[in-house]
Image (cartoon, rainbow, N blue to C red):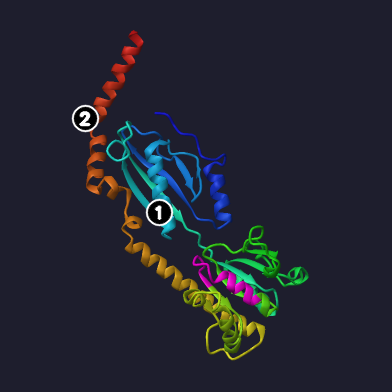
Amino acid sequence: MTHSPPSTALRWYQALEQAQAALAPHALATVVTVAGSAPRGAGTKMLITPAALHDSLGGGRLEQLVAIRARALLSAGHSGCHLEEVALGAHAQQCCGGHVQVLIEVFPAVAPRLALFGAGHVGQAIVALLAPLGWQIDWLDSREQQLASAHRPRGCEPHLHCSTFNILMRDDAVHPLPVAADSHVLVLTHDHVEDQALVAALAVRSDLASLGLIGSSSKWARFHQRLRAHLAANELARIRCPIGVPGIPGKRPEEIAIGVVAELLQLEALRHASISESSRADPAAASTLDQCGLSRKEARQLRTHFTAPDYRQSSSAVTSDSTTDRTAS
């Protein structure tokens, strides 16, 4: 059988190291048992990310099925180990005709992400609380000097990405909003005009985990009056203002930050619970390779067939005859 080459130059262990350091979603597939003929032997590994494959399980339909399954698990937010049974003939339409078990270890993107607009006192207090918890933080401010002088928690540099961004000087075509999908967003700049422009641009996005705006109820009443001429009702509803859990009366930056971070942790927990519930209700996400073409019972029967003494003896005889034929010729 012709083996397809790896999709990238990185070996699986190099890609694994990079993915884990970046807290990026990935899955490690390992051939754990082989019965009969198969493209690759037990112990063969392949690293799967949403965009690439690193190393190979031998190519063909087997590799494609494993990649599809791993990416479905990642997309559904699953984690942990998943053992898959594959009959190469009946299930993968590969002429090898053997049977393999593949262990897929799934590592979803476990680090929540926050896009934080504003490097003032409250912004710095939020970063001090959230960065040590492993959140990925994209910290932005229109004032380059303010961002450069802002306090950064020691040891959190890998999780903290700082950049200057001014929504009022943005060209949509050249400078798109630097906010990744599934991010929580907090807007707390030094300027109400910037605040309004940011929430107006962000509220139209349905791919954000949450959108919060710092301010009092009176500030939100004024913003709501202005924004409703430009935003639909469901877009306005995405904006959370005031932010923070209720019941904390203090107004010092650290007190405000405690309430805001507590609310973010609640929102992220609810989001994960919702994702898990959706994946359990999705038959495609919950299915296994077995259910796509091979039942557990059939897999056991196939393994028994390939490991039976009669099968091993006949396989040895075929190999011996083939060797004799080649020698005689």
Q: Residue furthest top?
A: 329
Please count the marks in the image: 2
Foreground: 116 or 101? 116
Q: Where is residue 193 drawn, in percent x and y? A: 67, 77
| Mark sitting on residue 28 | none
Q: Where is residue 80 drawn, in percent x and y? A: 41, 57
Q: Which stretch is magenta?
A: 195-210
| Mark sitting on residue 72 | 1
Horizontal side of residue 18 vs 146, given as left or right: left
Q: Where is residue 17 drawn, in percent x and y? A: 56, 50
State the quadrant of the C terminus.
top left
Residue lying at 49% horizontally and 77% vertically, measured from the top left: 237
User: Label 2: few (<14), some or many (≥20) within 10 Å?
Assistant: few
State which quadrant residue 74 falls in. Answer: bottom left
State the quadrant of the N terminus.
top left
Q: Residue furthest front?
A: 229
> What's the distance in space between the residues labelled 1 and 2, CA to CA?
39 Å
| Mark sitting on residue 310 | 2
The residue mark sitting in front, 1 or 2, is: 1
Work out whether mark 1 precedes mark 2 in sequence or the reverse, and give the earlier one.
1
Q: Is residue 325 magenta?
A: no
Under tag 2, what secondary structure?
helix
Q: Where is residue 156 drawn, in percent x and y? A: 65, 65
User: Label 1: few (<14), some or many (≥20) within 10 Å?
Assistant: some
Q: Residue furthest right?
A: 145
Residue lying at 68% horizontally and 65% vertically, measured from the top left: 170
